[in-house]
Every structure is written in structure tokens, then in C-alpha cells.
Image (cartoon, rainbow, N blue to C red):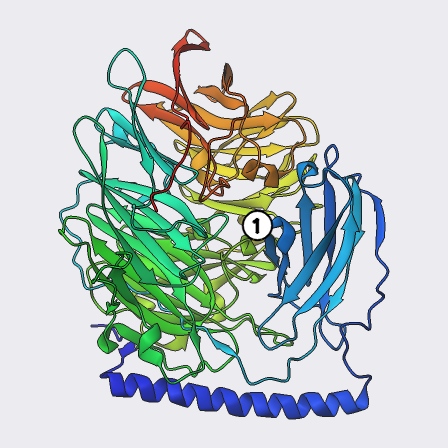
């Protein structure tokens, strides 16, 4: 038996541990305060006003139409870039976080600027004074605004308690989902991911803008069946984002996060054989925001709902009032008390003394959807707060890394592994950070493979878009995981070439077959990469640079997807959308190309793509598309124009055509979750049929020869959305 992490033996031991952390952090703060005061005596007093206050606006040539941009840097007292700063524009409900270079950027849609208006830019970081500046912005303006943060001089700091582990639930005897029933582009077969559309018998279940819909697809016509709020009549949805949908048997589960109540919401609905929905209950779990612009918070294996959410603890003595807990939500009813779902014996710690300003409890919760009352159990692990969450068919992994690494040569990080059989978690000391869940692969041979970068901060919020620095492939046997005292030796990291393309941030990676592929694209900005290098690495070989294949593409690397045993790379330049097929044989090479004129991707998330494999070197792919030159962030605002379909036939792309939307913009009366953060368009391949989900439209097509033709369509848009009060 291998060593594992140590759990707390009792609540008393847990309380003592956190009090000791508080004391150690207080001493560290006092020492830092003394050093800071000494530095201040030697230099000019830090002032957020010490930077030039003048704001220069110039034409935003890199933006489309009448959009505007606000950009700049956040600096510390020593004029060094300050990372992990939350930057907001409150009037527009826009928020981002600075990367390692301290930079931030907002693309302001033209529709938010009907006339010149005054806006405020607010920057905040724990331990620093909040700074707010006002500016006047008009269409086509580009504003540069650098802001300096000064020490708050206060003892209030946040202890990020982060915990990741699987609950004591044995997952066995789970049959893999039928291939013709799968409508979500998942990372692993049999591990479903929370999405916006699922299938239940002859019905599609769709989540959009705070509403649930069902559409019948079993007959000759498409027919809307049911529509209901994605929250219960006893729940106030204000400030809540309903993000992810999963279906297990007759249960429909909606996962959301409430900024008003400060927790994860799990809404449970029943769906009957006729596609009708009925509300069951809402469960609220203590957590902080789980959002990631690339990853998904939830997974489903059989009837086991698995989801990750971080949990942050403040410096107070009431530790138990902030530990993982759940309550069934009744507004004004009796069952409102939180019940702990992580006893001390399911809260783990490594041998390290994590006392920095970004400590956290990473928490993985597993709920049994077959239980009458949604039985949930949680496991937490104390560690640094930066994270990437990955679920294989056998285990849950959380790579936890520290943001507090200024001046360090090596990023402080630890990798946790929580087996899905309920056994105790284990850990390894590691370096760097993966970019997203696609940086991981747990292989059948008992190896864990992870692509890491030296300047990456995990997958929280928009942090995956800012990964940079050195690139290395970590390969380690799963049996090497232990109690966390061991660090992975340097020879387990294979140094890889660093992409040197124009855009330094929009990094994408994916394991496909026996190869690892990675490269740079345009990300959430405007398409601008007319060429990029795709790196193809045999991950089974820890050799040197000689085995790396470099393929020069005529576009950026904005999406990497498996296509049978090969891969397809999708990327846009300033005019067109490109698809490049990569043959992954003994000598990887470009096998095929197709260019869709005057187009960009309509969706950036992985679920926006789907490939139906019809045989060796044969299949059909679908991808939402939009107009030429559209910046990536616009997929949150504008719906896709259509879904394009390509046939892969003998390493040749054959264009089949596009199923397009005909719906005009409408006022749907949205009252909650009114931005499509997880997209609203999907290609669907189901039981030999082809559909395109486009906002509130479902279009069915059929392939005849080398063309796809529309067969039927239906609109399921609500007339008005109401909330029971």
C-alpha cells in the first residue's frame, strides 16, 4: 500500500491547525509590514495617485466596428507588474484578472456606448488598497490606464482553503454511455460533462438564460414540449448564474452559482416519459465561484454527480461555519440549516506548511442522484489556491499552485489525486501549472501525463488565457503519488519548445492518440494570426527535442480536437476560418485543409465542436460559426450565424454546408443568467440524425450526396420569463 495524505483526526485538531495557520500568517504579515515600512523609508511613499492621471484615447484599430477598449497594467509599490488583481468596470458588469505581466484588457461592445459615457475602473487585491479611476469612453476609443496598488496596512487577509478529493463512494459497474446517445464533446468516454444540452429518450433538454426547455425529436416533427425556470419557485434567482446541465435517468440537474447567497446551487427536476419537467428541490452548497472560461465544474459517471468548487476561509475562529456543507433550500421554511458534508476525517493536508496569502480548501463533492434526497459527501484538501480540475475515469485530480511567487525561480505547487473508489487521496510536489483540463492525460499504462508552463495560474475565471513561459511535459507513474513529501524530480519533466508566435497568451493543448499537440491562437481577442506553429510531441517518449514535429499552419491554433485517430486544428485569420487536418501516424503531417471564407468560430468552448466517427478516416464534424473578424469575446454577446458541417473522407475535407439561424433578436424577458457564458450553439449527432442548436432554434439537416439540406426547424423561445414571488 502507498502512503496517502493525512486527514484530521477530530474537529479539535482541525481547529488547532487553522488557528496555527492564522498565527503563522499574522507573524509573516508583521514581518512583511516591517520590511515594507523600511522600504518606504528608503523610497517615495507609495501612492495610487503617483502614476500619471492623464488618459489618452486613440482609435482602436484592432477592434471591430464601433467597439472600444480599456487596457493597462497594475503595478505594485516598486513599479513591478502585479498579478492576480481583480479589475472591474462596475457600470458594465465586466470583470477580469491580471496575469503575470500585470496587464488587463476590456473590449467594450458598441451597444454599451450609445453615447460618450463616464465609466469607472476599479482594481482590488487582498492586502492592498482598492483603487478606482474614472474615465470617459466613446465608441472606437482605446484607453491606456495604468494603476498602482498600495499596501492596505491592514491585518485582514483571506485564507483560501482549497480541497479536492473524491467522497467515499465506490463507482463500479458503470456502463459507458451508448455512442449514439452522446451529444456532448467530452474529454473521456463515460465521463459526461455539464453542458447546455442533453438527451433524455426522444427529447432534448436545453438550458439557456435561466430556463429549461424540452424539445421532442422522436417523431417526424420537432415539437417544443416544456419550458420552466431553471430554479425553483422558492428560490430568488437574482445574482445567480445557471451554467451546467446534466441528465441521469429521470433526473435533470442544473448547477449554478449565486453571488447573492455565495454558494453553489444544485437544482433537481424530474423529467417524465413525455418530456415534461417538474421541479423537485434546490440544494445549496457552501463554496466560492467555480467558473472557468474553459473548464466545466461538473462531471457525471453513472448516477454519481462529481463537481469541483473552491472554498475560502476568512481569518476568524468560526472555522466550522465555513466548512463544506449543504442545505435543502426552502425560502422561509424549516429546513434551512447547513449540514456538514466533510467531517474532519475527510479534510486532508500535506506535510507542507501552506501559510501564504493565497491558501485554499479545494473541495470535490460527489452526490448520488439515485438517492431520494441527493446524498452528497465532500472531501477537501488544504493547499494553495490556483487550480486546474481534471477527472479521468478512475480519479479526480487537482493541480494546486501558488500565486504568491514573486521573485521565486520555481512555482510552488502540489498535485492531488483522489481515487473514485473512495480511498484516501495522495499527492506529489510539482512545479509550474497546467493551463486547463486538456493539459492532463491519465493513460491506461498507469502513467499521468501533464503539460505545464512556468507562468500559468490555473483555470479559474479567465486565467487560462494568460499562460506563458517555459513549456514542459511531466510524466510520472501513478504509483509515485504518496503523502506529498516527495517532489517530482527534474528528469520527469521533458523540456519542450516554447511557441514564439505573435500572440503570447492564447495557448491551447490536447492529447490525441499517442501525441500531444500545442500551439498559440487569438483567444478572446480579434483574429489576427495569419500563421502559427503547431507542435506535435509523442508523449510516450521522454526523449529530447529531436522527436518534436513542427508544422507551420496558415492560421492560429484556436482549437485542437480529436478526429478519430487523427486531429483537426481550427483557427481564424483576419478574414477566414481554417480547418487543418493532422495525420498522426509514425510521421505527423498536414493531411488536409479547408477554408471557410468570411467566418470565425461562433463558440470557443470545447462543447461547441463535435465529430461523428463513421469509420477509419471517415466522419462528419460540426462547429458553430459567425461573421469574419469577430473577436472571441463576442460569443458571449452575439449568437452564432449557423453550424458548418464538413465530411472527413480519406484525409480530405468535403464541405457539406451550413445550417443557419433565421431568428431575429427578441426580448425573452430574461431575469437570471442572461449572458450565455457557456455558449448557445451546438452541433448534435444523435441516432444517425444531425441537428444544429442555435440559440432558441433547433434545426435538423440531412446529408444528401456532398451537401447538407435543412429538413425541419422549430423555435422554442419563451414569450415571457416570470418568477414566482
Camera-nearest residue between 336 and 711: 336
Residue 119 lies, in percent from the top left, at 72, 53
Name above or below for residue 213 compared with residue 142.
Answer: above
| Pick the front one: 715 or 471 | 715
Q: Is residue 437 visible?
A: yes
Q: Is residue 505 left or right of residue 683?
A: right
* Residue 322 rendering spot, x and y as whole percentages: 35, 73
Q: Is residue 375 left or right of residue 54?
A: left
Is 699 placed above or below 8 here? above
Position of residue 21 relative to residue 679, above or below, is below
Q: Is residue 573 left or right of residue 337?
A: right
Residue 703, picture quadrant:
top left
Question: Which residue of the protein is positioned furthest toward the front in this rendering?
Answer: 725
Q: Which residue is mark 1?
A: 546
- Look at the image and tell me whether residue 549 can be seen: no
The answer to which of 547 and 82 lies nearer the viewer is: 82
Q: Position of residue 129 (x, y in %)?
A: 66, 75
Q: Which quadrant: the N terminus?
A: bottom left
Q: Is residue 476 above or below residue 69?
A: below
Looking at the image, the residue that sits furthest to the top is: 705
Q: Position of residue 3 (x, y in %)?
A: 26, 76
Please tell me which residue is depicted at 19% across the width and 26% down the height of the picture: 274
Q: Residue at x 47, y 45 (%)?
A: 510
Amino acid at each position: 500500500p502507498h502512503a496517502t495524505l493525512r486527514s484530521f483526526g477530530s474537529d479539535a485538531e482541525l481547529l488547532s491547525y487553522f488557528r496555527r495557520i492564522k498565527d503563522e500568517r499574522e507573524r509573516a504579515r508583521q514581518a512583511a509590514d516591517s520590511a515594507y515600512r523600511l522600504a518606504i523609508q528608503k523610497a517615495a511613499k507609495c501612492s495610487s495617485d503617483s502614476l500619471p492621471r492623464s488618459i489618452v484615447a486613440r482609435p482602436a484599430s484592432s477592434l471591430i466596428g464601433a467597439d472600444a477598449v480599456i487596457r493597462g497594467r497594475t503595478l505594485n509599490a516598486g513599479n513591478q507588474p502585479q498579478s492576480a488583481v481583480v479589475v472591474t468596470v462596475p457600470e458594465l458588469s465586466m470583470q477580469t484578472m491580471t496575469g503575470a505581466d500585470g496587464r488587463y484588457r476590456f473590449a467594450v461592445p458598441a451597444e454599451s456606448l450609445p453615447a460618450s459615457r463616464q465609466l469607472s475602473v476599479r482594481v482590488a487585491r487582498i492586502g492592498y488598497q482598492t483603487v478606482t479611476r474614472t474615465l470617459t469612453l466613446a465608441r472606437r476609443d482605446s484607453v491606456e490606464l495604468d494603476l498602482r496598488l498600495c499596501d492596505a496596512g491592514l491585518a485582514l487577509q483571506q485564507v483560501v482553503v482549497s480541497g479536492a478529493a473524491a467522497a467515499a463512494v465506490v463507482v463500479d459497474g458503470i456502463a459507458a454511455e451508448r455512442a449514439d446517445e452522446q451529444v456532448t464533446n467530452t474529454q473521456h468516454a463515460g465521463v459526461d460533462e455539464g453542458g447546455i444540452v442533453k438527451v433524455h429518450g426522444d427529447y432534448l433538454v436545453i438550458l439557456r438564460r435561466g430556463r429549461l426547455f424540452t424539445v421532442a425529436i422522436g417523431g417526424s416533427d420537432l415539437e417544443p414540449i416544456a419550458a420552466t425556470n431553471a430554479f425553483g419557485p422558492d428560490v430568488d434567482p437574482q445574482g445567480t448564474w445557471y451554467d451546467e446541465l446534466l441528465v441521469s435517468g429521470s433526473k435533470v440537474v442544473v448547477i449554478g452559482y449565486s453571488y447573492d447567497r455565495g454558494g453553489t446551487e444544485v437544482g433537481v427536476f424530474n423529467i417524465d416519459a413525455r418530456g415534461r419537467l417538474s421541479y423537485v428541490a434546490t440544494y445549496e452548497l457552501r463554496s466560492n465561484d467555480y467558473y472557468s472560461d474553459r473548464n466545466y465544474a461538473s462531471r457525471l459517471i453513472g448516477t454519481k454527480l462529481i463537481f469541483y468548487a473552491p472554498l475560502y476561509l476568512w481569518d476568524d475562529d468560526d472555522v466550522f461555519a465555513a466548512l463544506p456543507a449543504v442545505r435543502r433550500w426552502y425560502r422561509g421554511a424549516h429546513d434551512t440549516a447547513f449540514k456538514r458534508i466533510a467531517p474532519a476525517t475527510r479534510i486532508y493536508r500535506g506535510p507542507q506548511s501552506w501559510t501564504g496569502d493565497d491558501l485554499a480548501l479545494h473541495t470535490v463533492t460527489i452526490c448520488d442522484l439515485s438517492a431520494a434526497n441527493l446524498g452528497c459527501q465532500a472531501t477537501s484538501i488544504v493547499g494553495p489556491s490556483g487550480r486546474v480540475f481534471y477527472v479521468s475515469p478512475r480519479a479526480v485530480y487537482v493541480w494546486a499552485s501558488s500565486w504568491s511567487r514573486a521573485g521565486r525561480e520555481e512555482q510552488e505547487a502540489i498535485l492531488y489525486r483522489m481515487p473514485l473508489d473512495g480511498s484516501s487521496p495522495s499527492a506529489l510536489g510539482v512545479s509550474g501549472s497546467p493551463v486547463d483540463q486538456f493539459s492532463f492525460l491519465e493513460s491506461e499504462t498507469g502513467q499521468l501525463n501533464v503539460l505545464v508552463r512556468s507562468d500559468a495560474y490555473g483555470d479559474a475565471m479567465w486565467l487560462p488565457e494568460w499562460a506563458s513561459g517555459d513549456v514542459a511535459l511531466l510524466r510520472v507513474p501513478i504509483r509515485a503519488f504518496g503523502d506529498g513529501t516527495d517532489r517530482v524530480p527534474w528528469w520527469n519533466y521533458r523540456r519542450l519548445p516554447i511557441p514564439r508566435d505573435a500572440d503570447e497568451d492564447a495557448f491551447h493543448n490536447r492529447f490525441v492518440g499517442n501525441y500531444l499537440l500545442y500551439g498559440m491562437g487569438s483567444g478572446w481577442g480579434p483574429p489576427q494570426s495569419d500563421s502559427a506553429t503547431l507542435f506535435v510531441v509523442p508523449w510516450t517518449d521522454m526523449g529530447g527535442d529531436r522527436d518534436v514535429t513542427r508544422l507551420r499552419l496558415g492560421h492560429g491554433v484556436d482549437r485542437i480536437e480529436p478526429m478519430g485517430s487523427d486531429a483537426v486544428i481550427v483557427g481564424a485569420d483576419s478574414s477566414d476560418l481554417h480547418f487543418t487536418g493532422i495525420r498522426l501516424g509514425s510521421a505527423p503531417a498536414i493531411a488536409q485543409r479547408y477554408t471557410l471564407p468570411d467566418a470565425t468560430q461562433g463558440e470557443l468552448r470545447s462543447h461547441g465542436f463535435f465529430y461523428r466517427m463513421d469509420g477509419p478516416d471517415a466522419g462528419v464534424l460540426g462547429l458553430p460559426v459567425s461573421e469574419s473578424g469577430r473577436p472571441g469575446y463576442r460569443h458571449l454577446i452575439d449568437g452564432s450565424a449557423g453550424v458548418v458541417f464538413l465530411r472527413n473522407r480519406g484525409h480530405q475535407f468535403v464541405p457539406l454546408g451550413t445550417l443557419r439561424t433565421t431568428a431575429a433578436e427578441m426580448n425573452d424577458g430574461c431575469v437570471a443568467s442572461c449572458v450565455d457564458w457557456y455558449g448557445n450553439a451546438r452541433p448534435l449527432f444523435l441516432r444517425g440524425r444531425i441537428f444544429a442548436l442555435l440559440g432558441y432554434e433547433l434545426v435538423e439537416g440531412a446529408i444528401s450526396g456532398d451537401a447538407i439540406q435543412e429538413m425541419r426547424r422549430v423555435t422554442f423561445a419563451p414569450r415571457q420569463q416570470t418568477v414566482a414571488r
